[in-house]
Amino acid sequence: VKNIAVLTSGGDAPGMNAAIRAVVRTGIYHKLNVFGVMYGYRGMIQDDIVPMDSKSVANIIQRGGTILKTARSKEFFTPEGRKKAYENLKKRGVDGLVVIGGDGSFKGAHVFSQEFGIPCIGLPGTIDKDISGTDFTIGFDTAANTAISAIDKIRDTADAHDRLFIVEVMGRDAGYIALYSGLATGAEHIMVPERPSDIENIVAALQDNERRKKLVNIIVVAEGCPHGSATEMAEVVRREIPSFDTRVCILGHIQRGGSPSCMDRIIASRLGYAAVKALLEGKYQSHMAGVINNEVRYTPFEQAIKTTEQIGEEWFGLYRILAS
Ligand code: F6P
């Protein structure tokens, strides 16, 4: 490889900048030309591609968002779109691509790499932690910490008023932000899409808490819960236990921003380096670099996008005992 390109795609995640910096600096160290593709696949199609140097990634390791911007491109999912994108890479002699994003971005990278034979390495950049082949995704730790500090604040006001709060966190179809932030803040109940929530049981447990004069309760609900959003859950609680003073708080996009945590900066740096190393060694075309048991591992895109991981019962047993 002589010329590589890097892009961020899909929802941004804290730590993406640290990953871009690692890719650019590792590439330059190995005397590669490095290009930054603006706005993900959309910029690849529209020829929005800029040369990167060491200075262009200075002072970004601590910044949230992505200096390369991001987008979700429908056109890249058409053969015509991908052809245009390929032509734009070809005219610069790009012979290796690093895609920082989530499952949608990896699907695109996989097809692209198969079609045009361009080696593509993915880095898991999403707050949702919904990717296989890595213990953590870049951005998850920061987002979970943001949710934790928000829920801690909510508990202060809940405590002052003896209130029940239902807090909705992000995660699309995954419940990890809810699980981690709920466990770390001592939430009385956690609802995730991966497991059916027994609403009747939750209501019964809340009624029991009321009898025990435990009036401050927090329920953390993952946005993707098929058994009810935070607002729907609040309706149930208001109907079944009208004596509770119930409030809803939807944390939303604040979970996507902010300075990345130590952990996100470290995995982003390790994986950015690992992506360029794989391209230099001509290995792992169409793979994602992840961290498993604190070691860098490469997983084919098809496997990385299959979220086979389940949230085990022991997690739920644990928080129920600790919150009782
Ligand atoms: O995938 C990251 C994520 O923040 C999800 O948790 C959420 O469902 C989605 O993106 C929100 O997307 P948008 O920013 O396009 O509203």
Image (tube, grey):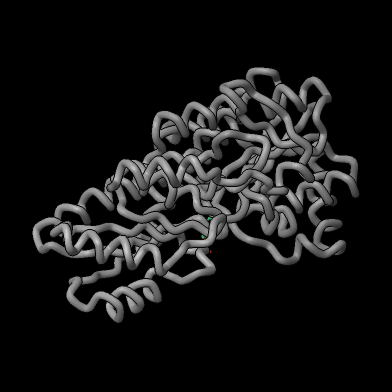
Residue drawn at the location 76% of the way across and 60% of the way down? 76
Quarter of the picture containing the N terminus is: top right
Left or right of 314 in this view: 103? right
Measuring from the top left, give residue 32's x and y in whole percent: 72, 25
* Residue sitting nearer the eye, 154 or 322: 322
| Residue 170 to residue 303: above or below | below
Residue drawn at the location 30% of the way across and 77% of the way down? 240
Residue 28 in view: yes
| Residue 319 to residue 77: above or below | above
Left or right of 268 in this view: 205? left
Residue drawn at the location 71% of the way across and 42% of the way down? 304
Task: Name the image quarter holding residue 36.
Answer: top right
Task: Name the image quarter holding residue 229.
Answer: bottom left
* Residue sitting nearer the eye, 288 or 235: 235
Measuring from the top left, give residue 218's x and y in whole percent: 28, 57
* Residue sitting nearer the eye, 171 or 315: 315
